[in-house]
Image: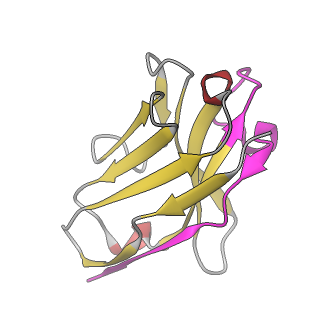
């Protein structure tokens, strides 16, 4: 099992940047594919980005490509999401998630463990 705690959310103006962090408990962090998934008010959850166990493979939603970067630090059991050029439509609760199933990095149903989420608000 792994427990996930997100941090780094907040309010920012359009065009600004934020960096989200996710701290994972446990000694088997490298077993997990890690992802960021978001949910805007009144909308379904949306895949944002994912990274494989060693960081060599990443995947992004089209809506964030070129603006967001996912990374991981296995020595510190951390995964991060650097968000640049933020837009009001990026406003959402951002969740960190973990999966041992690498069949499809963007398939949210494969993620077994979720954090509590951190709010990101982007004003125009």
Report the side of 7 relative to 2 (left or right): left
Vertical placement of residue 75 versus 63, above or below: above
State which region is magenta: 98-124
Residue at horizontal 70%, vertical 21%? 102
Residue at horizontal 80%, vertical 42%? 112
x, y percentage for residue 104?
69, 26
Q: Quadrant of residue 121?
A: bottom left
Query: In what quadrant of the picture does the N terminus appear?
Result: top right
Q: Nearer the viewer, residue 36 or 41?
A: 36
Residue 72 visible in the shown view: yes
Q: How is the image coloured?
A: secondary structure
Residue 62 visible in the shown view: no
Is residue 46 rendered magenta in the image? no
Vertical placement of residue 74 versus 98, above or below: above
Q: How many marks?
A: 0
x, y percentage for residue 7?
46, 64
């Amino acid at each position: 099992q792994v427990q996930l705690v997100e941090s780094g959310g907040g309010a920012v103006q359009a065009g600004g940047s934020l960096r989200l962090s996710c701290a994972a408990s446990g000694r088997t962090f490298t077993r997990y594919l890690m992802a960021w998934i978001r949910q805007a008010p009144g909308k379904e959850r949306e895949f944002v980005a994912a990274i494989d166990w060693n960081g060599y493979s990443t995947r992004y939603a089209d809506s964030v490509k070129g603006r967001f970067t996912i990374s991981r630090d296995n020595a510190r059991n951390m995964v991060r999401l650097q968000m640049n050029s933020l837009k009001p439509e990026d406003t959402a609760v951002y969740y960190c998630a973990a999966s041992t199933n690498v069949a499809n990095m963007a398939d949210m149903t494969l993620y077994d463990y979720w954090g509590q989420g951190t709010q990101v608000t982007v004003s125009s």
